[in-house]
Image: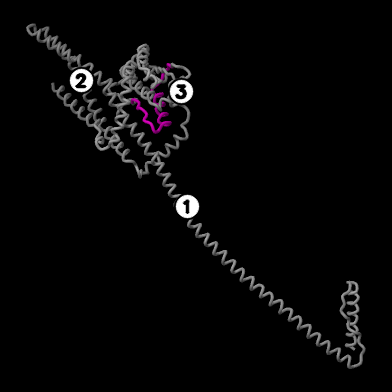
């Protein structure tokens, strides 16, 4: 009874924590979030139509799956033109490794598929590859989470039937959410995952990461030292809400795990307690009816605990874990959104810096232009002054040289005239000086010869 009391207290704690987790503290303050919730309710109503299909898709009977899909209305079939189910988990043992595969069945009416139906097998690592590619190529969309590889601590053997069935349900929900997404369902890697053969998918997985993802990782690394300047209050509220939601769901998960453990132990105790009363009834004949009634009641309680424990193991606990992972996915998308805003702000800062540099350069250009204009004006003025001085100085120099030559020849002429005057006084006959005339070069040569001979004669006389 003490265990039952602790279980009731744990249940009350879970209920209180879940109420705090799902009650949005920001709803009364933000009217826009009510519209978002209304849209999500509309989407959930559409998903409710597919509830029967999702339940039957966990069955291994393909006829039941086909009937469930065919039972959808024509409007839903037009809205969802691709249906994917994951079932039939199998364990494979080889010399190198032990692994599990799951059958992936696809039905579609899309024209870009070569066939309307596909059936193949995929490993858990293939699902990991698909999710990584979806996050890489669709960074602004919320990619559904995958179950963790070793998250179910209640199972010792990760290849046991219960573990594989639980994981198969989670993988089925993963691909169903992708198939219902209006953008992710058209991703090329999702098509490759659904249609490629094993060796083709292996070739795609070995391809190197794209240049965009490498650049994105480098930007992500450098983003840690940068703080956003103008994050919208709406996304700040989203950050606060998703962090609170993740913390609350983590508390729910821890408490539910403890409750599940207590319920499992309680069921085992009841299973052992009932047969003990039946054995005791065989020895206590007088109390056999009462003891058998006790045993029957205890066995009924133990049997009634089976759906409770199985429901927690198969539905409640996986759902809580899924939304814990979903909160991490939302945080990842918000971080990418902040990264894009960071790149935008860096670009704006770069533009501002370039603009400031341009303004500084413009001022420097104007200053240098003014300086050039001043240099041009000063140079022209100085050149004009230099030309004037040059003309004046050269004119004075040539005039002075000409005056000196004239003075020199006048002095020479005066001296020779005195000599000729003396000679005439001595009654010496002197030839007449040559008369200048305008004649041909030949005549001028003759006249120059006569002049030179006359000068020689006159010189001889003067010497005598």
Q: Earlier in the sequence, mark 2 or mark 1?
A: 2
Residues at marks 3 and 1 touching, judged by CB atoms closer than 8 Å:
no
Magenta segment range? 118-147
- Residue at 91 percent of width and 85 percent of height: 431
Q: Quadrant of residue 427?
A: bottom right
- Residue at 31 percent of width and 19 percent of height: 51
In the image, residue 133 lies in the stretch drawn in magenta: yes
Q: Residues within 10 Å of mark 1 (few under 14, many from 20)?
A: few
In the image, residue 347 lies in the stretch drawn in magenta: no
Q: Earlier in the sequence, mark 2 or mark 3?
A: 3
Residue 19 drawn at (x, y percent): 22, 29
Which residue carries the number 3 mark? 201
Q: Which mark is residue 255?
A: none
- Residue at 32 percent of width and 32 percent of height: 328
> Does 228 appear above or below 259?
below
> Does 347 appear above or below 332?
below
Residue 95 drawn at (x, y percent): 42, 18
Q: Which mark is residue 265?
A: 2
């Amino acid at each position: 009874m003490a265990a039952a009391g602790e279980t009731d207290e744990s249940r009350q704690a879970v209920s209180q924590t879940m109420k705090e987790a799902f009650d949005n503290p920001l709803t009364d303050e933000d009217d826009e979030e009510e519209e978002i919730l209304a849209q999500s309710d509309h989407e959930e109503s559409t998903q409710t139509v597919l509830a029967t299909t999702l339940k039957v898709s966990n069955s291994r009977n393909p006829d039941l799956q086909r009937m469930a899909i065919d039972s959808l209305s024509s409007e839903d079939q037009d809205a969802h033109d691709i249906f994917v189910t994951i079932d039939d988990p199998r364990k494979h043992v080889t010399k190198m490794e032990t692994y599990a595969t799951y059958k992936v069945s696809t039905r579609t009416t899309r024209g870009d598929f070569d066939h309307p139906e596909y059936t193949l097998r995929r490993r858990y690592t293939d699902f990991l590859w698909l999710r990584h590619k979806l996050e890489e190529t669709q960074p602004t969309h919320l990619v559904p989470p995958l179950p963790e590889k070793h998250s179910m601590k209640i199972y010792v053997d990760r290849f046991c039937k219960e573990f594989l069935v639980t994981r198969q349900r989670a993988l089925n929900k993963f691909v169903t959410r992708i198939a219902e997404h209006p953008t992710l369902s058209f991703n090329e890697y999702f098509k490759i995952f659904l249609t490629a053969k094993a060796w083709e998918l292996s070739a795609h997985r070995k391809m190197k990461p794209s240049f965009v993802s490498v650049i994105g990782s480098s930007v992500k690394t450098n983003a840690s030292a940068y703080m956003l300047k103008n994050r919208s209050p709406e996304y700040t509220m989203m950050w606060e809400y998703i962090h609170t939601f993740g913390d609350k769901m983590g508390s729910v998960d821890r408490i539910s795990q403890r409750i599940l453990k207590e319920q499992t132990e309680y069921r085992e105790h009841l299973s052992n307690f009932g047969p003990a009363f039946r054995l005791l009834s065989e020895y206590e004949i007088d109390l056999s009816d009462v003891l058998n009634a006790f045993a029957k009641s205890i066995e009924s309680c133990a049997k009634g605990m089976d759906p409770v424990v199985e429901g927690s193991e198969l539905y409640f606990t996986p759902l809580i874990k899924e939304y814990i992972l979903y909160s991490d996915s939302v945080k990842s998308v918000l971080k990418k959104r902040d990264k894009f805003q960071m790149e935008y702000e860096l670009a704006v800062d770069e533009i501002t810096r370039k603009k400031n540099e341009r303004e500084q350069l413009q001022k420097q250009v104007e200053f240098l232009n003014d300086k050039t204009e001043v240099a041009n004006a000063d140079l022209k003025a100085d050149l004009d002054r230099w030309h004037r001085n040059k003309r004046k100085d050269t004119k004075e120099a040539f005039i002075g040289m000409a005056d000196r030559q004239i003075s020199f020849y006048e002095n020479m002429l005066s001296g020779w005239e005195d000599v000729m005057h003396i000679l005439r006084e001595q009654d010496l006959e002197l030839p007449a000086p040559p008369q200048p005339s305008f004649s041909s070069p030949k005549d001028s040569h003759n006249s120059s010869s006569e002049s030179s001979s006359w000068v020689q004669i006159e010189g001889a006389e003067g010497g005598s």
